[in-house]
Image (cartoon, rainbow, N blue to C red):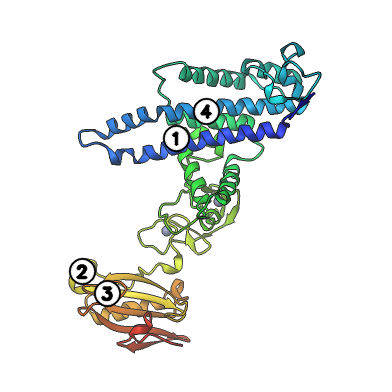
């Protein structure tokens, strides 16, 4: 009696694990490579550093290639096992002894050779694998064998590995879009690891962005639906699902759904959400973005209500920082009791201009959420405390439609005479 017979689903899941492992190895290599030029030796050119890096990465990339092939084999076995797992173990002549008289585990049987998998698959599965897949399958097998049986492995580029991975995934693991799958797999592993820090979405965004960077435009379109001719934006869903404590640079993987100038629908290939955006210029003066949602600019991710660099006409960046530097600390709520404060620094001619600049900012529509702005003239700042050389001008406080000036007192530090409303 044959026992421990794996199900079609178990073969498929095991194959997926191999392919995911290959994906992680490939991505780690590429990410290391992105940093490789920074760590070059003194007598190396950046090109030599990258060349040397890839030479050192060949074993890892070759390993990834093997895993892709094993993953595909397992997926094909799963499809055959869905018809009958017995098709995988050949004829009775090849079976281990004792099968008819006692229990023998499926694992002890010799299963089909890789070369037989496609003919058997196409003989018993209703949707046969096509010629392009057969060519691809043969190429991966040949490449893998070349790595395994050669003392000087061929050079595998990240482009090759990424494309091979995605072609295999498209053919055999496409029931769930790959980006979705990565989110699921990352979610599973994050609960398994100790020291829970939720960077799952950050990882997936980075990996997809890396993959797209190493694909030709037509391939990026084919595998991810990413249109290289269009601008990309940060997806607000993915942004807020990510850990935002450490990341400054955000992949822009969401794109407007039409090319019309006022288009507002934004589709994200990672989370597959469509966001209705607002088309308005970003409040950051140096940002050219004009697609806003959830209070952030989807180009620079700046919170729109923290764009303090307002056009009062009083800021003069040519003035010396040593003598003309002013801190503007905007706040709402109570200092020391959950209040929130955020700051900006500008150079202005004198106290009167600084005071007027603060008043102007508090009048701006996008800054209405803030209740106070404290203004300090700073010279040798000892953050967040002032030094003897620094001076507190005072703060503006919102009072209905009016602004009250409270002289000589900051609102953001209770120990400096802050508000206790
Ligand atoms: Zn998204
Ligand atoms: Zn912006």
Q: CA distance from mark 3 to mark 4?
A: 56 Å
Q: Earlier in the sequence, mark 2 or mark 4?
A: 4
Answer left or right for 407 relative to 119: left
In percent of width and height, residue 247 lies at 42, 54
Give the mark, 3 or 2, whose residue is nearer the N terminus: 2
Q: CA distance from mark 3 to mark 2?
A: 9 Å
The residue depicted at 29 percent of the width and 41 percent of the height is 38
Mark 3 and mark 1: span between their CA atoms? Answer: 45 Å
- Give residue 53's quadrant in the image: top left
Whichever of callouts 3 and 1 sits on the residue coming sooner in the sequence is 1
Residue marked by disc 1: 214
Q: Secondary structure at mark 2?
A: helix
Q: Tell me which image quadrant ligand 2 sits in.
A: bottom left
Ligand 2 contact, mark 2 (Cβ < 8 Å): no
- Whole-percent x, y for residue 168 in the image: 58, 29
Distance from Cα at disc 2 to Cα at disc 4: 55 Å
Secondary structure of the residue carrying numbered label 4: helix
- Asked if the beta carbon under badge 4 is closer than 8 A to the nearest atom of ligand 1, the reply is no
Image quadrant in which the N terminus is located: top right
Q: Position of residue 47 (x, y in %)?
A: 29, 32
Q: Which residue is mark 3?
A: 326
Q: Is residue 120 left or right of residue 320?
A: right
Q: Is residue 232 above or below residue 49?
A: below
**Sequence-earlier tag: 4 or 1:** 4
Compared across the picture, whether 15 is left or right of 351 comes to: right
The circle drawn on residue 164 is 4
**What crowding class fits label 3: few (fewer than 14 Cα within 10 Å), some (14-19), or many (20 or more)?**
many
**Which residue is disc 2 drawn over?**
321
């Amino acid at each position: 009696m044959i026992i421990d017979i794996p199900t079609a689903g178990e073969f498929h899941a095991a194959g997926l694990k191999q392919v995911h492992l290959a994906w992680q190895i490939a991505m780690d290599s590429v990410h290391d490579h992105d940093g490789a030029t920074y760590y070059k030796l003194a007598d190396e050119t950046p090109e030599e550093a990258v060349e040397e890096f890839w030479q050192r990465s060949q074993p890892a990339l070759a390993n990834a290639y093997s895993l892709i092939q094993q993953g595909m084999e397992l997926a094909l076995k799963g499809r055959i096992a869905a018809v009958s797992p017995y098709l995988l173990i050949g004829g009775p002549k090849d079976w281990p002894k004792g099968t008819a008289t006692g229990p023998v585990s499926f694992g002890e049987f010799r299963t089909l050779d890789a070369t037989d998998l496609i003919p058997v698959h196409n003989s018993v599965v209703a949707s046969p694998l096509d010629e392009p897949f057969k060519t691809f399958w043969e190429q991966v097998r040949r490449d893998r064998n070349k790595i395994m049986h050669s003392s000087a492995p061929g050079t595998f580029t990240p482009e090759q590995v990424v494309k091979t991975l995605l072609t295999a995934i498209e053919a055999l693991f496409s029931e769930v879009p790959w980006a979705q799958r990565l989110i699921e797999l990352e979610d599973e592993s994050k609960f398994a690891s100790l020291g829970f820090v939720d960077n799952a979405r950050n990882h997936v965004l980075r990996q997809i962005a890396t993959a797209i960077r190493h694909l030709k435009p037509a391939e990026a379109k084919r595998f991810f639906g990413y249109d290289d001719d269009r601008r990309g934006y940060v997806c607000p869903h993915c942004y807020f699902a990510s850990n935002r404590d450490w990341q400054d640079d955000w992949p822009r993987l969401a794109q407007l759904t039409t090319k019309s100038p006022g288009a507002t629908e934004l589709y994200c290939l990672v989370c597959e959400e469509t966001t209705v955006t607002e088309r308005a210029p970003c409040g950051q003066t140096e940002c050219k973005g004009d697609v806003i949602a959830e209070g952030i600019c989807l180009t620079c991710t700046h919170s729109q209500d923290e764009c303090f660099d307002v056009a009062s006409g009083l800021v003069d960046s040519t003035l010396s920082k040593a003598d003309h530097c002013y801190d503007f600390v905007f706040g709402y709520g109570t200092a020391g009791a959950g209040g929130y404060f955020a700051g900006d620094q500008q150079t202005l001619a004198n106290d009167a201009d600084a005071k007027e600049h603060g008043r102007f900012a508090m009048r701006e529509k996008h800054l209405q959420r803030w209740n106070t702005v404290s203004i300090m003239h700073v010279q040798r700042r000892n953050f967040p405390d002032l030094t003897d050389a620094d001076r507190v001008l005072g703060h503006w406080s919102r009072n209905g439609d009016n602004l009250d000036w409270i002289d000589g007192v900051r609102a953001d530090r209770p120990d400096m005479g802050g508000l206790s409303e």
